Amino acid sequence: MQQPQTYRFQWQGIEIEATYIPIKWGVIAHLEIESIHPKRAPLPVTETGYKSHFHPCGTVEAKGGDVVAQIVAWLDEEAAKPEWRAYAAKSRQGELF
């Protein structure tokens, strides 16, 4: 197993920590994404603020190897979907009932 790579970055006001392991168990890559401030804030890829994602080895590297850029692109892509846009609008407005 390769050493985990840990990254912290901001996305739309949410501090995120991502841990990437390029080769886990010799057969697969693993990415963990967690919102840490606000803690466990929902993200477009997870309602709970935590996502564990397995994918084929070399996937990140084949797209340039920039883990943070690829996560941000994934978040942006999912945030453009109607479900997330509705959630974001509702969160900004608040609910009366």
Image: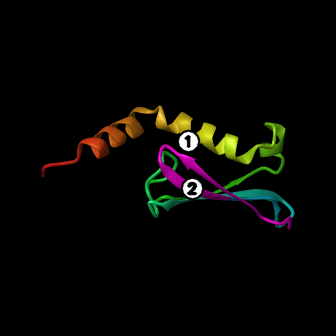
The residue labelled by disc 2 is 16
User: Is the residue marked by circle 1 packed among few (<14), some (14-19), or many (20+) residues within 10 Å?
Assistant: some
Q: Residue at x 46, y 64 (%)?
A: 39
> What kind of residue is marked 2?
Ile
Q: Amino acid at mark 1?
A: Leu
* Rendered location of residue 29, percent (x, y): 77, 56
Residue holding disc 1:
75
Check disc 2 and report its element: helix, strand or loop.
strand
Residue 2 part of the magenta-drawn span: yes
- Circle nearer the N terminus (2, 1): 2
Q: Nearer the viewer, residue 59 or 94?
A: 94
Percent across and percent down for residue 10 are: 56, 49
Question: Marks 2 and 1: which is nearer the front?
Answer: 2
Left or right of 58? Residue 90 is left
Q: CA distance from mark 2 to mark 1?
A: 11 Å
Determine the secondary structure under disc 1.
helix
Membership of 3 in magenta stretch: yes
How is the rendered protein coloured? rainbow
Name the image quarter holding residue 72.
Answer: top right
Compared across the picture, whether 9 is left or right of 46 comes to right
* Front residue of 25 and 92: 92
Is 48 placed above or below 62 here?
below
Query: Is residue 85 found left or right of 35 in the rendered image?
Result: left
Q: What's the magenta region?
A: 1-18
Q: Which mark is residue 36?
A: none
Crowding at dot 2, Cα within 10 Å, few <14 / some 14-19 / many 20+, comes out as many
Tell me what residue is drawn at x 48 percent, y 60 percent. Answer: 37
- Give the quadrant of the N terminus: bottom right
Which residue does the image show at 19% across and 48% down from the upper left? 95
